[in-house]
Amino acid sequence: MKFFKGTLRSVPQKADAAPGDRKGSREEPEFSSGTRVEVLTMENHLLFVGRLRVLGGGVLEMRRDTGDPLPQALYNSKVKLRGFQRNSQPFCVTGTVGKSSRDFWQVENLEILQSRENRSFFRQNTELDARVMPSGHYRGTSREMTECKVLDVSAGGARILSRNVYLEGDRFQLEAELLPDERPFSVVCQVLRITPRKGFKYEYGCKFEGLSEQEQQRLLRAVFIIQRKMLQAQRE
């Protein structure tokens, strides 16, 4: 079931640029039941990740995939919902919490956020060991596979810490194991931003290139799983 258009108001919002960011579209999103969403505070603190259900009349309901109890909701408190439509376009809306229980939250009074928010919504700190190797357009000399660290990752890009020297526009192949029981991700990254760090290291803000829809969904699923594990660890 899709949520009909024409019931949302647009609210301008500023957002910091991040690797892979593009200016968001002002077109109203079409919500589909079953869509995975992040539920956050207005300060972007992640409350939980769940599945959306369209109730109609401008009301959305969120439940957890795992069946775990939801945090206690304050009636009429404002929250932010972020996710992807079926056409892979991201959306971000705000709303107020109406009915709620340990099993579900209902959010109403929806408003679109007009900003540069996109796939970087799902950016997750990782600090994972990984490997990089120059690929395609690269102006350096060494093309060996070397170790690096993935500082954070999203469905559209990542921040990489490496001793390798790259220039803006250079590309490298990133291989990383985000989840221990799944095959590694292998993706081409293009350098968008460079920040020198101590110890002759460099932090690279990168966007992913040529990532298939299937691999992007697999990557997004891995990010959600990492988020869920971190939230569970915080509660314990």
Image (spheres, grey):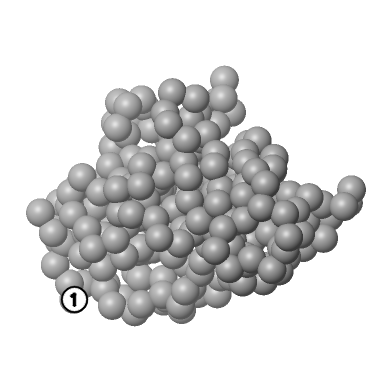
Residue 185, position as x, y percentages in the image: 46, 41
Residue 50, position as x, y percentages in the image: 33, 40
Please say whether residue 74 is visible from this viewpoint.
no
* Dot 1: element: loop
Residue 206, position as x, y percentages in the image: 59, 61
Along the viewing direction, whichever of 174 and 12 lies nearer the viewer: 174
Q: Is residue 95 above or below residue 185?
A: below
Residue for point 15% across, 51% down: 55
Residue for point 43% across, 38% down: 222
Along the viewing direction, whichever of 231 and 207 lies nearer the viewer: 207
Residue 153, position as x, y percentages in the image: 54, 49
Q: Residues within 10 Å of mark 1 (few under 14, many from 20)?
A: few
Q: Is residue 140 above or below residue 229?
A: below
Classify residue 78 by image quadrant.
bottom left
Residue for point 35% across, 64% down: 91
Q: Looking at the image, which residue sits at the far right?
A: 199
**Residue pointed to by mark 1:** 6
Query: Which image quarter is the N terminus in?
Result: bottom left
Q: Looking at the image, which residue sits at the far left?
A: 1
Q: Is residue 205 above or below residue 38?
A: below
Q: Is residue 190 left or right of residue 62?
A: right
Q: Is residue 16 left or right of residue 166?
A: left
Badge 1 amino acid: Gly
Classify residue 112 by image quadrant.
bottom left
Along the viewing direction, whichever of 54 and 217 lies nearer the viewer: 217
Query: Which image quarter is the C terminus in?
Result: top right
